[in-house]
Amino acid sequence: MKTKEDSIKSRENHISFYSKLSDDEKKLFRKSANLILPEKRILTFNDLIQFEKVKELLLPIKKKYKINLNELLTIIKEQVFFPVSVLNKKLTILESVVKYLKEEKEFSLRKISEVIGRDERNIWHIYNRTKEKYPKKFVIKKTEFWIPVNIFSKTKLSALEAIVSYLKEEFSLTYHEIAILLKRDDRTIWTVYQRAEKKNVKSK
């Protein structure tokens, strides 16, 4: 039987594996994660079709790192996601994510710093701010959009730039649709995405 310590060690190994991937490989990895979200317990026929797509997407990573498919799928299923519905006008993107992970997923601040890829002291300050700005618990509303927290580990992008880019590129949403989800105006989303694009081009 798998103990809590085993689970923690396993997740740490998976985080370490993800950090070794190139930007293009991480993009493939996140796309695969979108197709088999860990929150889903009952699979439909369409889910099985998606599963076949996932296997094809993961082939390059499987071959390069000499890792079997089952292990890759396990890593994907253990990725940490948050529902886009927790985002609100009172908190920044990172504040919302940290609050969700601390209060809903019951992660320690150290664990949050690991999965987000930010300094633990920074996470401590962020969480303290959320308690002042938004002391009540989140009401988790149903949404089709779940975001992997590892998108924030790309430090060249701000949290807002990272999530706007992710929603735009992974879900092909319009600026207006993203604005509604993130509780921002259309012009802000357009500006943020253009800024993120420029940063990505410079880093290549």
Image: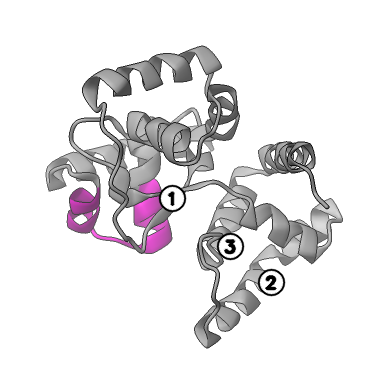
Mark drawn on residue 32: 3
Whether residue 198 can be seen here: no
Q: Nearer the viewer, residue 82 or 61?
A: 82
Which range is magenta?
Answer: 165-181
The C terminus, quarter of image: top right
The answer to which of marks 1 and 3 sits earlier in the sequence is 3
Q: Picture coordinates of residue 100 (x, y %)? A: 40, 38
In the picture shown, does residue 43 fall above or below 165? below
Observer-side mark, 1 or 3, equals 1
Hey, which quadrant is residue 132 in on the image?
A: top left
Q: Tell me the element at label 2.
A: helix
How far, Cα to Cα, is label 1 from label 3? 12 Å
**Snapshot quadrant of residue 30:** bottom right
CB contact under 8 Å: marks 2 and 3: no
Q: Residue at x 17, y 55 (%)?
A: 176
Which residue does the image show at 49% across and 41% down from the upper left? 105
> In this picture, is 155 found above or below 40?
above
Q: Residue furthest right?
A: 66
Q: Which residue is mark 1?
A: 147
Q: With 20 as the anchor, is 145 left or right in this view?
A: left
In-front residue for pair 102/91 = 102
Amino acid on which the number 1 mark rests in the picture? Ile
Type of colouring: one colour
